[in-house]
Image: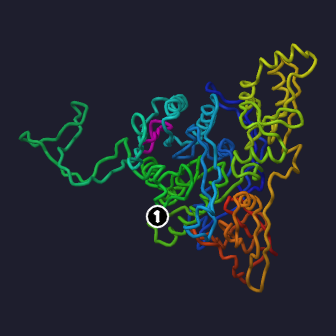
Amino acid sequence: MSESEQLSFEFAQRPTIKGYPELRWTGKRPYLSTQYYPAQLRETYGEATNGWVNKIFWGDNLQVMSHLLKEYRGKIDLIYIDPPFDSKADYKKKIDLKGIGKAESDSSSFEEKQYGDIWTNDEYLQFMYERLILMKELLSEKGSIFLHCDWHKSSYLRCLMDDIFGQNCFRNEIIWHYADNFQGNVRGFATNHNNIFWYSKGQKFTSNPIMIPLDKPTKRDKRIWSSELGKLVSARNPDGSLIYEIFTEKKADDVWEVGQSSTTKSASKEFLGYPTQKPEKLLERIIKAASNSDDLVFDCFMGSGTTQAVAMKLGRRFIGADINLGAIQTTTKRLLSVASELESKIQDEPKYTGFEVYNVNNYDFFRNPVEAHDLLIAALEIQPFPQSNVWDGELDGRMVKIMPVNRIAIKADLKELLANLPYKTYEKRKEESPHQPVERMTIVCMGHEPDLKGALEQELSDYKVDVEVLDILRDKADLQLKRESEAEIVREGDELVIREFYPLNLMQKLYLQKEYVEDWRQLVDSIMIDWNYDGVVMQPAVIDIPGKNAMVSGVYAIPENAGTIKVKITDLLSESLEMEVR
């Protein structure tokens, strides 16, 4: 999968609760941007890990999984997902400038929206169904899936899982109880748990016992299986007296109290500031219970990369995906840290520490779908309608609807629009002016099915409508959706020196926040350098990722065998500038 192409696919027919999707391919693949291999194993890494390299995908997981089907259908041994909960909330991450003391931190930080968990009508269940059916296809015959959710949609998701995987493949509903989350001023009982549904692909699945140490040794009667009675019974001596055993541990049940809750996790050393981050102890239990060494683990709602980090530590192979650029950067830094720690110690068994990062579709102008929506409104100079549940705004006298921006638009994406149109108003307009359009509308998309316009007109055949489809990739290919970063990088003798760095989008946010930056390094999250860039895939030999309050160096010694140098500077918004220095 080293082709420098882009992946694109579409549904021939939108999947519903009654059927599976048919995929229509355009034949392109993800673009491999960066390879991260252990420094001491760079030349022999493939041999050390039997040729396997872990993979991280930036893009819509529906497209990622459609691509993975070709090579990994029936080969993934464990899937854990922590998808949106339909919590009706926007999740934000606090962005702090580098090199700022704690006393100044409140005035030198701002919040950046990561994703919105707000859904309308049946969008959420359709979103989950489309992805769950692909996950089933990816699972191996011994594989299992763990779906993490909460009270908002747990009952609906259980029905979906029963429909897709079968009721006979339901294994457990695990309650993750975080007792450290104290809630006051609530009517009723405080909500201190999440739900995790465990389903297997078939009846022969991996299941390893998880033993939990007891607070103190416990004396209990010994239990044995009685073939005659067909159940467990207490073991007895020949004289009929009970046989006792001393237990120092017990088998885990379906109520887990591991890790910290979402409200207190910030006190943990592993907390990375990513909203909805889950504790490593939780994933460690799941991965140990439902997979073995060398098994392949998949998480397509990757977030901060907890699943991938724990899989790497436990000697599992992994694939991850997320649509949020911030998640990709957070996970990349986390995995590099874990790999470095593992490589510094003698391991009893091989650890899969190398990984590659792929970009799915050429939508790298946005960090997340929420921001992309706002960028399009600003770039196209649309007058926004923030309170409307039908239109996103108005442009040149036309009502504007922005389709999903992380993939091509298909006919089924029109469903929400059609459900909310003001048909009573259209009837009145039709009666008053029968020869005039009842509405002039513009559909904005990033690629679309050829008959999208015709499909909308067909659905509105009772009315005269003026429909225009504005395809950003085709009609506005030169549209500047964001300002690119700039930098001054030079060679001074035997050193590579970064003199200046201007991340213009970040600087604009800081300007709006009325912040003042003294040193460009305050704006940098990481710097990576490939001393011999091959023109295709970056393989960084220098990875400068400073601590929370430290700053990058900015000056790096150039090795004697350096050729074409490629530098990647990533700012605090996870946006990157890549430059070649010859």
Q: Which residues are magenta?
A: 192-207
Residue assigned mark 1: 349
* Relative horizontal placement of residue 483, taking residue 295 as reference (left or right): right
Q: How is the image coloured?
A: rainbow
Q: Is residue 53 visible?
A: no
> Could you say which is closer to the camera, residue 13 or residue 76?
13
For image coordinates 59% across by 58% down, the residue present is 331
- As for residue 539 lying within the magenta part, the answer is no
In the image: residue 170, left or right of residue 30: left
* Residue 199 within the segment the image draws in magenta: yes
Name the residue type under label 1: Glu
Viewer-nearest residue: 553 or 3:
553
Rendering coords of residue 234 (x, y %): 18, 39
Place of residue 149 in the rendered image (x, y in percent of width and height, measured from the top left): 50, 39
Residue 170 sits above or below residue 365 on the image: above
Q: Please determine whether, in this image, residue 124 is positioned above or below residue 477.
A: above
